Image: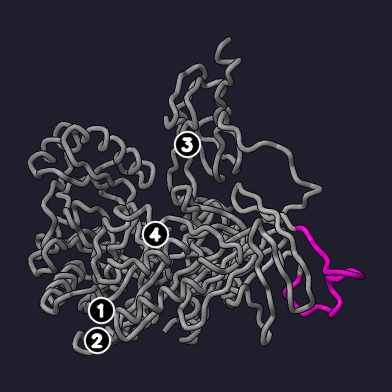
Amino acid sequence: MFDTILIANRGEIACRVIESARAMGVRSVAVYSDADRGAKHVALADAAVHIGGSAPAESYLRGARIIEAAKASGAQAIHPGYGFLSENPDFVEAVEAAGLVFIGPSAKAIRAMGLKDAAKALMEEAGVPVVPGYHGEEQDPEFLAKQAAEIGYPVLIKAVAGGGGKGMRLVEEPGAFGEALKSAQGEAATAFGNEAVLIEKYIQQPRHIEVQVFGDGERAVHLFERDCSLQRRHQKVIEEAPAPDMPEAVREAMGAAAVRAAEAIGYKGAGTVEFIVDGSDGLRADGFWFMEMNTRLQVEHPVTEAITGVDLVEWQLRVAAGERLPKAQDELSITGHAFEARLYAEDVPKGFLPATGVLRHLKFPEGARADSGVRSGDEISPWYDPMIAKIIVHGPTRDVALQRLADALARCEVAGTVTNLSFLGALARHEGFGRGEVDTGLIARDIEALTAMPAPRPAHFALAALAAQDLLGDVAGDTGFSLWAPLNRQVVLRRGEEEEELTLRALGPDAHDVVMGEAVIAARRVGGRWMLDGEVAPPVVVTGDLVTVFADYGIGFHVIDPLARASAAGGDASVIEAPMPGLVKAMFATPGAEVKAGDRLAVLEAMKMEHSLLAARDGVVAEVLAKEGAQVEAGAPLVRLADEEEAAA
């Protein structure tokens, strides 16, 4: 076994690898960028090496620098985590050329599965079923359109080098094919440096079921399946293991196919074989097809660990060190059910826009596993994926596990940035999902209900006002009183664009009345805890001018000083600003051009995704304030529309 490994990654996966390495007595070395100098993974590791600037291209994608760091720190092996260099065969070869061990598959195996079209051809040879489609090299648009017609609409256009939903477009009728193809190729070129695509038959009621495999270079086993059907725009949101309503015969067929796939390429280490499954008439042994193989550890690997009792990172280290497979297939079994929910810093009402900010308060519930790369006080950086944590639960049955997930999400406490907690909670309590009626279209069908934000109740405002005035802790008996009567205090809170003025009437250290409009909320401390109109008050934290009440997945209120209240009007629809720091990938606006509300004016690339910036109203472009290729900060003006006088001139 190695005595030291270097982890060529960051965030929660780096922390995850460090934990298993430490449990095995293996020393871990972290690498970090400028932005990650104070990050959690740096603090957890036994040693840490600075490798460059904040941008991934200046740090976590610098293979040569990472190898130098490994050699200088005495590491014998490099664990790539996922993302970054984890599926880069050139990096694998460079690691091995430097006399180090890559904790993962061979460069040959990664290349075999790296391009979707070549991988599908290889799988057909290995007897693994593949989706009907065109996977060839010809990329002429007319030729591809003809192939789509022969396959039959609807079809999916997919980047051959793709992943994470990038370079993927659904086309439902022939007239939309040309524009969708152009869009997919452009996104694929940006994300992967390869604009080639393949065309596949679109399964009408698809489920995304994947099989965890593990090989030692000769033999392979599977650790059963995960259902990842709950997706938004091809991005996984909640994963579970095993798949609901999975017949044992289908499980055996899928597992055997996944093992054939792994053994066909001499696979070594942890990998995932992903299948698209027709769920329109139940799961059938002839109703699943190979989609792709991820030649690395998956983000959702914890649910497999939960149901099998296997530490997949430990297995990775043991096999990379030359050991054989730790268990045979007949020694592996399923116990109970597990779910994982991906908690992100996202502004759900604004279309799941990735968010930044300082995590002023972060607390995860007891009884749930939380894999996280951040702590209270850490910043969600614009340079990387905005994941806060993965919340993982396990139970003896699917119903129990799902209830535990819903409860865990409700008890997560995050303050300082917007999150998708409410969205995740709505999914966990979705009746159809609870019945196991899952397919990849569920979220899109019910998106309005799932993203509806609950309105704060008067009690929430009251609790925030009391916390803002520091009236919830242990206070002196005469606090809040004037000579003859209870003292009234005015508190102004802002929630979104709305402001509310509340009056606090201090009746004693353990009793306050809060007036909000016509409502009077009675706050009383009983048995050491606060009650609001007879109900137990939820947790609340105050950080600066932000008060967060941990009800309905976290409700933030800003305390407004009436004497310092700004009189400025709201946002100007004439100015299109960058919603977050990023790169101006494309600028479509030109001075003097007429635009309509909703027209795309620019594309901003941030947090590994492209975001279209749209005109808020009809008008004429007065100024273009940023150039393509410019790196801009949040709030930077990009385009200005002419006002009425300018437009008339």
Q: Which amino acid is tagged 2?
A: Leu
Mark 3 burial class by Cα count in 10 Å: few <14, some 14-19, many 20+: many
Say whether residue 67 is visible.
no
**Mark 4 or 3: the one toward you:** 3
Q: Mark 4 points at which residue?
A: 91
The quadrant of the picture occupied by the N terminus is bottom left
Q: Name the residue under label 2.
A: 332
Earlier-in-chain disc, 1 versus 2: 1
Q: Name the residue under label 3.
A: 613
Residue at figure coordinates x 84%, y 74% from the top left: 479
Mark before the other along the chain sequence, 4 or 3: 4
Q: Tell me how far mark 4 sits from mark 3, CA to CA.
A: 36 Å
In the picture as drawn, the residue positioned furthest to the bottom comes out as: 331
Location of mark 1 (residue): 223
Contact check, label 1 and label 2, Cβ < 8 Å: yes
Q: What stretch is highlighted in magenta?
A: 471-490
